[in-house]
Image (cartoon, rainbow, N blue to C red):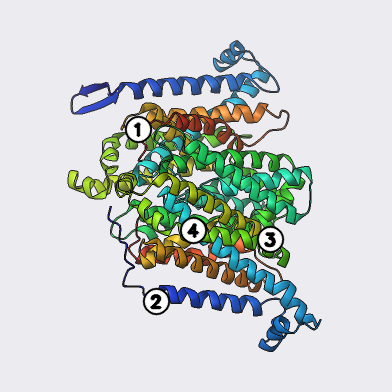
Amino acid sequence: MTVALRPRAAAPWALPGAVVLVVAGTVLSMKVGARPLSWAELSDGLLHFSGAPSDFVVRHVRLPRTLCGLLAGACLGLAGTVAQGITRNPLAGPDTLGVNAGAAAAMIAVMTAGIGSLAGHVWFGFLGGAVAALTVYAIGGSGRDGATPVKLALAGAAVSALLTAVTSAFVLLDRDLFARYRYWIIGSLARAELPTVGQALPFAVAGIVLAVLLVRRLDAVALGEDASRSLGARPGPTRAAGLVAVVVLAGTATALAGPVVFVGLVAPHAARALVGTAHRWVLPLSALLAAGLVLIADVAGRVVIAPEEIHIGVTAALLGGPVFLHLVRTRKVAAL
Amino acid sequence: MTATLVVRRGPVSARIGVRGLVLATATWTAAVAVGMAAITIGEYPLPLATVLDTLAGNGSLITYDIVVTHRLPRSLTGLLVGAAFGVAGCVLQRLARNPLVSPDVIGINAGASAGAVVMIIGFGASAAWVTGGALAGAVIAALTVYAVAWRGGFSGYRLVLVGIGVAAMLGSAATFLLSRAEINAAYAAAVWLVGSLSGRTWPDVVPVAVGLGLLLPVVLALVRRLQVLELGDDLARSLSPRVGRARAVLLACAVGLSALATASAGPVGFVALVAPQIVRRVLAERSPGLVASAGTGALVVVAADLLARTAFAPRELPVGVVTAVVGAPVLIALLVRGNRIGASG
């Protein structure tokens, strides 16, 4: 397998294009909705809060929602890239390493026990995701050959399946729980609040920094077990650090927007289709593409069946799916 | 430990691994035994002798109703569905050279689920229509995936990526319907989506039985090609010129098997993923172990269904919830044991 470490010359516009996408998504997300805002209302609301109705819309609805989408999208894009990098498996995502299944199981556990507010549930979800991922690493890393990509992926699939089974059992034996769970599981930005964004920010920053620090090591791991060892890179510690990054990033995204698995799964593929496999290009591009997709999907969800909304988990797949299929079909997809 | 038997009869010859043979026999024996045990256990327990008497045609009207009308078709559906998923998963994982590939990844389950959910929520349809909707959905999804992925040939990698995209779109459409439906319909759809053997009767046995009867021989005949394909596209093409056709046929068989199994019992989760992996790690051989995969799949499903029926009796869980509880610990134990064979594939 050859690994092209230079960006493909065919898509020099990819990174600037993705920046434009994110900016456009941000502007749309601020302006469009049940109550469309003019530029003047928008700047007034952001800069001179006077208590007018439009100011409340800006500060308490649009701003948290947009920030939430930006942050969740970026986290998902990075988490997916790192997860696929350390497992060297194109099917890997936050859910493969057990993070989402763990988060869902923990959410269900606290919903059943009836503790705390929704905001509190969110952090239980984070904890559940972390515990699940640690279990996956403990299983995948056991044995004499350590945490090979295949063992990590399979351990993740097995632990995810177990946790999902427990979750489904709880949900299907209790109809009230099912009624609430079916909304959470879709993923949505509709419940975004500024305090949640504030709580999530340190985690997001920590995860992003860790992912950036891993850029070079991910390239080395991509060469395969033997080649990377012979180059002096140590795949084991890289995988451990990568797993921490995935847990933090995916946990944060799930806390902000619910389990929007699809975005984290396809953003890295789209990025690789555009710029090749070097992680110093793939990581930022994947983060930008994911953030852009989340924002635009959220805006579309507000407009399509207004005054009702379609949640982001649905629109992201319906909008991002065709684009992804087009990329896969027209460009030579870079294998991991 | 790669002892093999070579069978030659006229133009037909086959190499059979001894370990594979032992494992296949053991898993099938266990699966049938659990299936029989499941017939004796339930709200109205029947001794094995009575069950056998009834099957021989000497039972009372009540035992006939319990055994032949209800429990036997349920056990049979479980066995056949498990076997079909086991074979489909084995073929798909080998073709794509990726242990995470299973029918749900390449869009088949998502298509079936979308079809069934539309039938349940959109039309409040009866069981037969749901089965038909699922079958139609699976076939449409599979055709879509292949049409999009076909570029003068199949690459396993592109197929998987296209499958992910199509599955996500269909899945989100189903989730959307689920979130807007009336709660009871949504609940019925959710149970179907997990995979259930509840209330399965003879008409449910037919699709999967026909599918296995027609497609399993084809897959078995192409086992050697499967081993060649697993070497990767370039090497496979240089070893065998008509390898592209074998790949297309094997894919079609895997799709057909999982579509029919899904129509019978819903997308019973995790079986297609776990059965081939268990076999691969136990066998420690490069042979695909198709029959053993089928046996393991069957065992996982009937054991899971028995557990699902009895653990919370009189309440019943859908079997798809429990397959992971039966299969995952085995896979985890095998992973912890750290078998080096298969570590790279």
The reply to whether callout 2 and callout 4 are in contact (CB within 8 Å) is no
Task: Please tell me which residue is depicted at 69% across the width and 89% down the height of the picture.
Answer: A40
Amino acid type, label 4: Ala
Q: Badge 3: how crowded within 10 Å, few (<14), some, or many (20+)?
A: some
Mark nearest the camera among 2 and 3 is 3
Mark nearest the camera among 1 and 3 is 3
Report the Cα–Cα distance between label 1 and label 4: 32 Å
Q: Is B272 placed left or right of A32 in the picture?
A: left
Q: Which residue is mark 2?
A: A13
Compared with B143, A310 (above or below) is below
Report the Cα–Cα distance between label 3 and label 4: 20 Å
The reply to whether callout 1 and callout 4 are in contact (CB within 8 Å) is no
Report the Cα–Cα distance between label 2 and label 1: 44 Å
Amino acid type, label 1: Ile
Q: Which chain is mark 2 on?
A: A
Residue B61 seen from this side: yes
Q: Which mark is residue B341?
A: 1
N-term mark: 3 or 4: 3
The reply to whether callout 3 and callout 4 are in contact (CB within 8 Å) is no
Residue B136 seen from this side: no
N-term mark: 2 or 3: 2
Quadrant of the rendered structure where residue B287 is? top left
Q: Report the front residue among B333 and B324.
A: B333
Mark nearest the camera among 2 and 4 is 4
Q: Position of residue B137 (x, y in %)?
A: 51, 52
Amino acid type, label 2: Trp
The reply to whether callout 2 and callout 3 are in contact (CB within 8 Å) is no
Q: Which residue is mark 4?
A: A211
